[in-house]
Amino acid sequence: MPSTAGARSALLRGITRNVVVLGVVSLLTDISSELLIMVIPLFLANVLAATPVVIGLVEGIAESAAAVLKLGSGALSDRLARRRVLVGTGYGTSVLAKALYLVAATWPVVLVARVGDRLGKGIRTAPRDALIADSTPPEARGRAFGLHRAMDTTGAVIGVALAALVIDHVQGGAVLLELETFRILALVALVPGVLAVLVVAIGVRDVRRSPRSVASSAPGTVPAPRDAPPAVTGAGLRDLPAAFWLFTLATGLFTLGNSSDAFLALRSQDLGVGVRDLLLIAVAFNVVDALVAWPMGALSDRLGRRRLLAAAWSLYAIVYAGFAVAGGSGVVLPLWLLYGAYYGVNEAVGRALVADLATPERRATAYGIVNAVVGLAILPASVVAGLLWDGLGPAAPFWFGAGCAAAGILVLGFVRPARTAARG
Protein backbone atom coordinates (compact mmCIF):
# COMPACT_ATOMS: atom_id res chain seq x y z
CA MET A 1 0.00 0.00 0.00
CA PRO A 2 2.73 2.57 0.82
CA SER A 3 4.46 1.80 -2.47
CA THR A 4 1.21 2.38 -4.35
CA ALA A 5 0.73 5.73 -2.60
CA GLY A 6 4.32 6.64 -3.36
CA ALA A 7 3.92 5.80 -7.03
CA ARG A 8 0.75 7.87 -7.23
CA SER A 9 2.50 10.79 -5.54
CA ALA A 10 5.42 10.54 -7.97
CA LEU A 11 3.09 10.57 -10.98
CA LEU A 12 1.22 13.63 -9.67
CA ARG A 13 4.27 15.65 -8.63
CA GLY A 14 4.42 18.89 -10.60
CA ILE A 15 0.95 18.45 -12.16
CA THR A 16 -0.89 21.79 -12.18
CA ARG A 17 -4.48 22.95 -12.62
CA ASN A 18 -4.03 23.91 -16.27
CA VAL A 19 -2.67 20.47 -17.12
CA VAL A 20 -5.69 18.77 -15.55
CA VAL A 21 -8.23 21.12 -17.17
CA LEU A 22 -6.61 20.80 -20.59
CA GLY A 23 -6.67 17.05 -20.06
CA VAL A 24 -10.44 17.20 -19.47
CA VAL A 25 -10.84 19.28 -22.64
CA SER A 26 -8.88 16.72 -24.65
CA LEU A 27 -10.86 13.88 -23.08
CA LEU A 28 -14.15 15.42 -24.23
CA THR A 29 -12.76 16.30 -27.66
CA ASP A 30 -11.48 12.78 -28.21
CA ILE A 31 -14.85 11.33 -27.28
CA SER A 32 -16.26 13.51 -30.05
CA SER A 33 -13.51 12.75 -32.58
CA GLU A 34 -13.20 9.01 -31.96
CA LEU A 35 -16.91 8.49 -32.43
CA LEU A 36 -16.13 9.23 -36.09
CA ILE A 37 -12.46 8.89 -36.89
CA MET A 38 -12.37 5.12 -37.38
CA VAL A 39 -15.57 5.08 -39.44
CA ILE A 40 -14.86 8.02 -41.76
CA PRO A 41 -12.63 5.95 -44.11
CA LEU A 42 -15.22 3.16 -43.95
CA PHE A 43 -17.96 5.68 -44.77
CA LEU A 44 -15.94 6.85 -47.75
CA ALA A 45 -15.26 3.31 -48.96
CA ASN A 46 -18.49 1.49 -48.03
CA VAL A 47 -21.13 4.20 -48.56
CA LEU A 48 -19.59 6.69 -51.00
CA ALA A 49 -17.56 4.07 -52.96
CA ALA A 50 -14.33 6.09 -52.73
CA THR A 51 -11.09 4.39 -53.82
CA PRO A 52 -7.99 4.05 -51.59
CA VAL A 53 -6.36 6.88 -53.58
CA VAL A 54 -9.29 9.20 -52.83
CA ILE A 55 -9.26 8.19 -49.17
CA GLY A 56 -5.53 8.88 -48.99
CA LEU A 57 -6.07 12.24 -50.68
CA VAL A 58 -8.83 13.22 -48.25
CA GLU A 59 -6.79 12.27 -45.19
CA GLY A 60 -3.57 13.78 -46.54
CA ILE A 61 -5.11 17.11 -47.54
CA ALA A 62 -6.96 17.33 -44.24
CA GLU A 63 -3.78 16.89 -42.22
CA SER A 64 -1.57 19.07 -44.41
CA ALA A 65 -4.11 21.89 -44.64
CA ALA A 66 -3.55 22.49 -40.94
CA ALA A 67 0.25 22.53 -41.23
CA VAL A 68 0.66 26.25 -41.90
CA LEU A 69 -1.82 27.11 -39.15
CA LYS A 70 0.12 24.97 -36.69
CA LEU A 71 3.22 27.01 -37.45
CA GLY A 72 1.38 30.34 -37.51
CA SER A 73 -0.62 29.78 -34.33
CA GLY A 74 2.51 28.75 -32.44
CA ALA A 75 4.41 31.86 -33.55
CA LEU A 76 1.41 34.10 -32.79
CA SER A 77 1.03 32.52 -29.37
CA ASP A 78 4.67 33.26 -28.55
CA ARG A 79 4.40 36.81 -29.85
CA LEU A 80 1.28 37.61 -27.82
CA ALA A 81 2.37 35.54 -24.81
CA ARG A 82 -1.27 34.42 -24.68
CA ARG A 83 -2.41 30.91 -25.51
CA ARG A 84 -6.01 30.51 -24.26
CA VAL A 85 -7.86 32.34 -27.04
CA LEU A 86 -6.12 30.34 -29.76
CA VAL A 87 -6.79 27.09 -27.89
CA GLY A 88 -10.50 27.88 -27.60
CA THR A 89 -10.76 29.01 -31.21
CA GLY A 90 -9.21 25.77 -32.39
CA TYR A 91 -11.57 23.56 -30.44
CA GLY A 92 -14.58 25.61 -31.57
CA THR A 93 -13.58 25.37 -35.24
CA SER A 94 -13.41 21.58 -35.02
CA VAL A 95 -16.91 21.36 -33.56
CA LEU A 96 -18.40 23.49 -36.33
CA ALA A 97 -16.68 21.37 -38.99
CA LYS A 98 -18.07 18.12 -37.56
CA ALA A 99 -21.62 19.38 -38.18
CA LEU A 100 -20.99 18.98 -41.93
CA TYR A 101 -20.94 15.19 -41.56
CA LEU A 102 -24.69 15.34 -40.95
CA VAL A 103 -25.25 16.35 -44.59
CA ALA A 104 -22.27 14.68 -46.32
CA ALA A 105 -23.41 12.81 -49.45
CA THR A 106 -20.23 13.04 -51.56
CA TRP A 107 -16.56 12.69 -50.72
CA PRO A 108 -15.74 16.41 -51.34
CA VAL A 109 -18.11 17.32 -48.48
CA VAL A 110 -16.28 14.85 -46.26
CA LEU A 111 -13.02 16.49 -47.38
CA VAL A 112 -14.30 19.94 -46.35
CA ALA A 113 -15.40 18.60 -42.97
CA ARG A 114 -12.07 16.85 -42.41
CA VAL A 115 -10.13 19.96 -43.43
CA GLY A 116 -12.20 22.12 -41.06
CA ASP A 117 -11.65 19.69 -38.21
CA ARG A 118 -7.90 19.57 -38.85
CA LEU A 119 -7.71 23.38 -39.20
CA GLY A 120 -9.13 23.57 -35.70
CA LYS A 121 -6.46 21.17 -34.53
CA GLY A 122 -3.85 23.25 -36.34
CA ILE A 123 -4.94 26.39 -34.51
CA ARG A 124 -4.97 24.86 -31.04
CA THR A 125 -2.19 22.26 -30.88
CA ALA A 126 0.98 24.36 -30.56
CA PRO A 127 -0.49 26.90 -28.09
CA ARG A 128 -2.01 24.09 -26.03
CA ASP A 129 1.23 22.12 -25.80
CA ALA A 130 3.17 25.30 -25.00
CA LEU A 131 0.63 26.15 -22.28
CA ILE A 132 1.13 22.71 -20.74
CA ALA A 133 4.90 23.24 -20.80
CA ASP A 134 4.54 26.79 -19.40
CA SER A 135 2.38 25.44 -16.57
CA THR A 136 4.85 22.72 -15.57
CA PRO A 137 8.35 22.73 -14.03
CA PRO A 138 10.98 21.17 -16.35
CA GLU A 139 11.52 18.10 -14.17
CA ALA A 140 7.82 17.19 -14.47
CA ARG A 141 7.28 17.70 -18.21
CA GLY A 142 7.20 14.01 -19.00
CA ARG A 143 4.59 13.41 -16.30
CA ALA A 144 2.50 16.38 -17.46
CA PHE A 145 2.43 15.38 -21.10
CA GLY A 146 1.94 11.75 -20.10
CA LEU A 147 -1.11 12.63 -17.98
CA HIS A 148 -2.52 14.79 -20.77
CA ARG A 149 -2.03 11.99 -23.27
CA ALA A 150 -3.62 9.47 -20.89
CA MET A 151 -6.71 11.67 -20.44
CA ASP A 152 -6.86 12.36 -24.18
CA THR A 153 -6.75 8.65 -24.90
CA THR A 154 -9.28 7.83 -22.19
CA GLY A 155 -11.64 10.03 -24.21
CA ALA A 156 -10.75 7.98 -27.26
CA VAL A 157 -11.61 4.76 -25.41
CA ILE A 158 -15.01 6.17 -24.44
CA GLY A 159 -15.63 7.55 -27.94
CA VAL A 160 -14.79 4.33 -29.76
CA ALA A 161 -16.78 2.28 -27.25
CA LEU A 162 -19.82 4.53 -27.80
CA ALA A 163 -19.37 4.16 -31.56
CA ALA A 164 -19.27 0.37 -31.19
CA LEU A 165 -22.48 0.44 -29.11
CA VAL A 166 -24.27 2.61 -31.66
CA ILE A 167 -23.15 0.39 -34.54
CA ASP A 168 -24.16 -2.77 -32.70
CA HIS A 169 -27.59 -1.28 -31.99
CA VAL A 170 -28.20 0.05 -35.52
CA GLN A 171 -26.62 -2.55 -37.80
CA GLY A 172 -25.30 -5.39 -35.65
CA GLY A 173 -22.22 -7.26 -36.86
CA ALA A 174 -22.41 -6.22 -40.52
CA VAL A 175 -19.03 -5.96 -42.24
CA LEU A 176 -19.88 -2.76 -44.16
CA LEU A 177 -20.88 0.58 -42.64
CA GLU A 178 -24.36 1.93 -43.40
CA LEU A 179 -25.38 5.56 -44.06
CA GLU A 180 -27.91 5.75 -41.21
CA THR A 181 -25.30 4.55 -38.74
CA PHE A 182 -22.84 7.22 -39.78
CA ARG A 183 -25.44 10.00 -39.49
CA ILE A 184 -26.33 8.96 -35.92
CA LEU A 185 -22.65 8.85 -34.94
CA ALA A 186 -22.11 12.35 -36.35
CA LEU A 187 -25.01 13.72 -34.32
CA VAL A 188 -23.85 12.13 -31.07
CA ALA A 189 -20.29 13.42 -31.64
CA LEU A 190 -21.39 17.06 -31.45
CA VAL A 191 -22.38 16.87 -27.77
CA PRO A 192 -18.95 16.29 -26.13
CA GLY A 193 -17.37 18.64 -28.67
CA VAL A 194 -19.53 21.54 -27.49
CA LEU A 195 -18.83 20.65 -23.84
CA ALA A 196 -15.07 20.80 -24.52
CA VAL A 197 -15.35 24.37 -25.82
CA LEU A 198 -17.27 25.37 -22.68
CA VAL A 199 -14.60 23.88 -20.42
CA VAL A 200 -11.89 25.88 -22.23
CA ALA A 201 -13.88 29.08 -21.74
CA ILE A 202 -14.50 28.42 -18.05
CA GLY A 203 -11.45 26.54 -16.80
CA VAL A 204 -8.28 27.29 -18.81
CA ARG A 205 -6.05 30.16 -17.69
CA ASP A 206 -3.12 31.81 -19.43
CA VAL A 207 0.22 31.62 -17.61
CA ARG A 208 1.63 35.11 -17.34
CA ARG A 209 5.29 34.47 -17.65
CA SER A 210 8.71 35.92 -18.00
CA PRO A 211 10.62 34.10 -20.77
CA ARG A 212 13.70 33.85 -18.57
CA SER A 213 11.96 32.23 -15.66
CA VAL A 214 9.17 30.16 -17.23
CA ALA A 215 11.26 27.03 -17.45
CA SER A 216 11.63 26.81 -13.69
CA SER A 217 8.48 28.46 -12.38
CA ALA A 218 5.03 27.20 -11.59
CA PRO A 219 1.99 28.98 -13.05
CA GLY A 220 0.74 32.03 -11.20
CA THR A 221 4.07 32.76 -9.47
CA VAL A 222 5.72 34.89 -12.14
CA PRO A 223 4.65 38.48 -12.92
CA ALA A 224 3.53 39.23 -16.44
CA PRO A 225 6.30 40.38 -18.81
CA ARG A 226 6.20 44.02 -19.81
CA ASP A 227 6.69 43.16 -23.45
CA ALA A 228 5.65 40.12 -25.47
CA PRO A 229 8.39 38.16 -27.22
CA PRO A 230 9.36 39.64 -30.58
CA ALA A 231 7.89 38.41 -33.83
CA VAL A 232 9.40 35.28 -35.31
CA THR A 233 12.06 36.14 -37.85
CA GLY A 234 15.07 34.37 -39.29
CA ALA A 235 17.05 35.59 -36.31
CA GLY A 236 14.33 34.33 -33.98
CA LEU A 237 14.37 30.90 -35.54
CA ARG A 238 18.12 30.78 -34.93
CA ASP A 239 17.27 30.88 -31.23
CA LEU A 240 16.23 27.24 -31.69
CA PRO A 241 19.27 24.98 -31.24
CA ALA A 242 20.71 22.57 -33.81
CA ALA A 243 19.43 19.58 -31.84
CA PHE A 244 15.87 20.81 -32.33
CA TRP A 245 16.29 21.04 -36.11
CA LEU A 246 17.85 17.58 -36.23
CA PHE A 247 14.91 16.20 -34.27
CA THR A 248 12.55 17.93 -36.71
CA LEU A 249 14.36 16.25 -39.62
CA ALA A 250 14.05 12.85 -37.95
CA THR A 251 10.34 13.46 -37.34
CA GLY A 252 9.82 14.43 -40.99
CA LEU A 253 11.52 11.29 -42.28
CA PHE A 254 9.49 9.13 -39.91
CA THR A 255 6.23 10.80 -40.92
CA LEU A 256 6.81 10.29 -44.66
CA GLY A 257 5.89 6.65 -44.06
CA ASN A 258 3.33 7.32 -41.34
CA SER A 259 0.22 7.46 -43.50
CA SER A 260 -3.22 8.07 -42.03
CA ASP A 261 -4.58 5.45 -39.64
CA ALA A 262 -7.38 5.12 -42.18
CA PHE A 263 -5.14 2.61 -43.96
CA LEU A 264 -4.81 0.54 -40.79
CA ALA A 265 -8.61 0.44 -40.59
CA LEU A 266 -8.91 -0.51 -44.27
CA ARG A 267 -6.18 -3.16 -43.92
CA SER A 268 -7.95 -4.63 -40.89
CA GLN A 269 -11.20 -4.78 -42.85
CA ASP A 270 -9.29 -6.29 -45.78
CA LEU A 271 -8.10 -9.06 -43.44
CA GLY A 272 -11.71 -9.89 -42.52
CA VAL A 273 -12.52 -7.72 -39.48
CA GLY A 274 -16.08 -6.28 -39.42
CA VAL A 275 -16.95 -2.69 -38.49
CA ARG A 276 -18.15 -3.42 -34.96
CA ASP A 277 -15.20 -5.69 -34.19
CA LEU A 278 -12.78 -3.14 -35.62
CA LEU A 279 -14.13 -0.55 -33.20
CA LEU A 280 -13.81 -2.95 -30.29
CA ILE A 281 -10.19 -3.53 -31.32
CA ALA A 282 -9.76 0.25 -31.42
CA VAL A 283 -11.06 0.41 -27.84
CA ALA A 284 -8.33 -2.01 -26.78
CA PHE A 285 -5.75 0.00 -28.76
CA ASN A 286 -6.71 3.19 -26.94
CA VAL A 287 -6.72 1.48 -23.54
CA VAL A 288 -3.10 0.43 -24.11
CA ASP A 289 -2.25 3.95 -25.27
CA ALA A 290 -3.80 5.47 -22.13
CA LEU A 291 -2.11 2.98 -19.78
CA VAL A 292 1.32 3.47 -21.34
CA ALA A 293 1.46 7.25 -21.82
CA TRP A 294 1.57 8.53 -18.24
CA PRO A 295 4.09 6.09 -16.70
CA MET A 296 6.32 6.23 -19.80
CA GLY A 297 6.23 10.02 -19.71
CA ALA A 298 7.26 9.88 -16.05
CA LEU A 299 9.98 7.34 -16.89
CA SER A 300 11.40 9.72 -19.49
CA ASP A 301 11.86 12.32 -16.74
CA ARG A 302 14.31 9.87 -15.13
CA LEU A 303 15.88 7.89 -17.97
CA GLY A 304 15.84 10.36 -20.84
CA ARG A 305 13.47 10.90 -23.75
CA ARG A 306 15.47 10.17 -26.88
CA ARG A 307 16.04 6.47 -26.20
CA LEU A 308 12.41 5.88 -25.26
CA LEU A 309 11.28 7.67 -28.42
CA ALA A 310 13.62 5.55 -30.55
CA ALA A 311 12.14 2.44 -28.92
CA ALA A 312 8.62 3.66 -29.77
CA TRP A 313 9.54 4.25 -33.42
CA SER A 314 11.11 0.78 -33.57
CA LEU A 315 7.87 -0.70 -32.27
CA TYR A 316 5.99 1.20 -34.98
CA ALA A 317 8.24 -0.35 -37.64
CA ILE A 318 7.51 -3.82 -36.26
CA VAL A 319 3.75 -3.16 -36.31
CA TYR A 320 3.78 -1.93 -39.91
CA ALA A 321 5.87 -4.88 -41.03
CA GLY A 322 3.36 -7.11 -39.25
CA PHE A 323 0.45 -5.60 -41.18
CA ALA A 324 2.45 -6.07 -44.38
CA VAL A 325 2.91 -9.82 -43.89
CA ALA A 326 -0.43 -10.54 -42.17
CA GLY A 327 -2.45 -13.29 -43.78
CA GLY A 328 -5.61 -13.31 -41.67
CA SER A 329 -7.63 -11.52 -39.01
CA GLY A 330 -6.00 -13.34 -36.08
CA VAL A 331 -3.00 -10.99 -35.97
CA VAL A 332 -5.01 -7.77 -36.18
CA LEU A 333 -5.70 -7.38 -32.45
CA PRO A 334 -2.09 -8.02 -31.28
CA LEU A 335 -0.76 -5.57 -33.87
CA TRP A 336 -3.22 -2.88 -32.82
CA LEU A 337 -2.24 -3.39 -29.16
CA LEU A 338 1.44 -2.91 -30.02
CA TYR A 339 0.47 0.13 -32.04
CA GLY A 340 -1.24 1.54 -28.94
CA ALA A 341 2.00 1.14 -26.97
CA TYR A 342 3.87 3.03 -29.70
CA TYR A 343 1.31 5.82 -29.65
CA GLY A 344 1.41 6.27 -25.89
CA VAL A 345 5.18 6.63 -25.75
CA ASN A 346 5.50 8.71 -28.92
CA GLU A 347 2.91 11.33 -27.99
CA ALA A 348 3.95 11.84 -24.37
CA VAL A 349 7.72 11.59 -24.72
CA GLY A 350 7.98 13.32 -28.10
CA ARG A 351 6.09 16.42 -26.94
CA ALA A 352 8.16 16.62 -23.75
CA LEU A 353 11.36 16.36 -25.83
CA VAL A 354 10.32 19.37 -27.93
CA ALA A 355 9.94 21.42 -24.74
CA ASP A 356 13.43 20.31 -23.68
CA LEU A 357 14.98 21.30 -27.01
CA ALA A 358 13.30 24.70 -27.48
CA THR A 359 14.12 27.98 -25.79
CA PRO A 360 11.27 29.11 -23.51
CA GLU A 361 10.41 32.21 -25.54
CA ARG A 362 10.18 30.12 -28.73
CA ARG A 363 8.40 27.12 -27.24
CA ALA A 364 5.07 27.43 -29.09
CA THR A 365 6.96 28.26 -32.27
CA ALA A 366 8.92 25.04 -31.88
CA TYR A 367 5.72 23.01 -31.44
CA GLY A 368 4.29 24.77 -34.47
CA ILE A 369 7.33 23.89 -36.59
CA VAL A 370 7.30 20.20 -35.62
CA ASN A 371 3.54 19.94 -36.08
CA ALA A 372 3.77 21.75 -39.43
CA VAL A 373 6.45 19.34 -40.66
CA VAL A 374 4.29 16.40 -39.60
CA GLY A 375 1.22 17.91 -41.27
CA LEU A 376 3.04 18.63 -44.52
CA ALA A 377 4.54 15.14 -44.62
CA ILE A 378 1.16 13.48 -44.02
CA LEU A 379 -0.13 14.51 -47.48
CA PRO A 380 2.56 12.73 -49.52
CA ALA A 381 2.57 9.89 -46.98
CA SER A 382 -1.16 9.24 -47.39
CA VAL A 383 -1.21 9.78 -51.17
CA VAL A 384 1.78 7.47 -51.64
CA ALA A 385 0.12 4.88 -49.39
CA GLY A 386 -3.02 4.98 -51.56
CA LEU A 387 -0.98 4.68 -54.77
CA LEU A 388 1.08 1.81 -53.37
CA TRP A 389 -2.09 0.02 -52.22
CA ASP A 390 -3.73 0.39 -55.65
CA GLY A 391 -0.58 -0.36 -57.62
CA LEU A 392 1.24 -3.03 -55.61
CA GLY A 393 -1.31 -4.34 -53.10
CA PRO A 394 -2.34 -3.78 -49.47
CA ALA A 395 1.05 -4.79 -48.03
CA ALA A 396 3.11 -2.20 -49.94
CA PRO A 397 2.29 0.96 -47.92
CA PHE A 398 3.14 -0.84 -44.69
CA TRP A 399 6.57 -1.92 -45.93
CA PHE A 400 7.18 1.69 -46.97
CA GLY A 401 6.15 2.93 -43.53
CA ALA A 402 8.48 0.52 -41.77
CA GLY A 403 11.38 1.69 -43.95
CA CYS A 404 10.74 5.38 -43.24
CA ALA A 405 10.58 4.63 -39.52
CA ALA A 406 14.04 3.05 -39.74
CA ALA A 407 15.39 6.19 -41.46
CA GLY A 408 13.90 8.40 -38.77
CA ILE A 409 15.43 6.29 -35.99
CA LEU A 410 18.85 6.61 -37.63
CA VAL A 411 18.69 10.42 -37.62
CA LEU A 412 17.20 10.51 -34.12
CA GLY A 413 20.34 8.77 -32.88
CA PHE A 414 22.34 11.92 -33.65
CA VAL A 415 20.09 14.23 -31.60
CA ARG A 416 22.09 15.44 -28.61
CA PRO A 417 20.33 18.03 -26.44
CA ALA A 418 22.87 20.40 -24.91
CA ARG A 419 20.88 20.71 -21.70
CA THR A 420 17.51 19.14 -20.94
CA ALA A 421 15.31 18.45 -17.97
CA ALA A 422 15.83 14.73 -18.46
CA ARG A 423 18.92 12.83 -19.54
CA GLY A 424 19.35 11.40 -23.03
Image: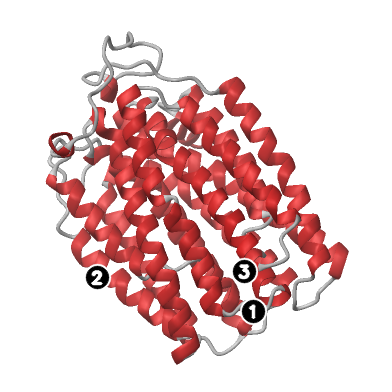
| Residue at disc 3, secondary structure | helix
Q: Which color mode does the image show?
A: secondary structure
Name which residue lies at 31% across and 72% down: 404
Closer-to-camera residue (118/127): 118
| Residue at disc 2, secondary structure | helix
Q: How many marks?
A: 3
| Residue at disc 1, secondary structure | helix
Q: Height in image: 128 above or below 380?
A: above
Name which residue lies at 23% across and 33% down: 232
The image quadrant of residue 176 is bottom right
Sequence-wise, which precedes: disc 1 or disc 2? Answer: 1
Closer-to-camera residue (321/228): 228
The residue identified by callout 1 is 269
Badge 3 density bin: few <14, some 14–19, many ≥20, Cα 10 Å: many
Q: What amino acid does circle 1 point to?
A: Gln
Distance from the alpha carbon under mark 2 to that under mark 3: 28 Å
Q: What amino acid does circle 2 point to?
A: Ala
Asked if residue 332 shows in the view, the reply is yes
Which dot, 2 or 3, sits closer to the camera? 3
Sequence-wise, which precedes: disc 2 or disc 3? Answer: 3
The N terminus appears in which quarter of the rendering? top right
Distance from the alpha carbon under mark 1 to that under mark 2: 29 Å
On residue 406, the disc is none
Name which residue lies at 46% across and 44% down: 294
Badge 1 density bin: few <14, some 14–19, many ≥20, Cα 10 Å: some
Whether residue 95 sits left or right of residue 146 in the image: it is right
- The location of residue 152, given as percent across then percent down, is 55, 44
Q: What amino acid does circle 3 point to?
A: Pro
Which dot, 1 or 3, sits closer to the camera? 3
The residue identified by callout 3 is 41
The residue identified by callout 2 is 407
Name which residue lies at 80% across and 76% down: 174
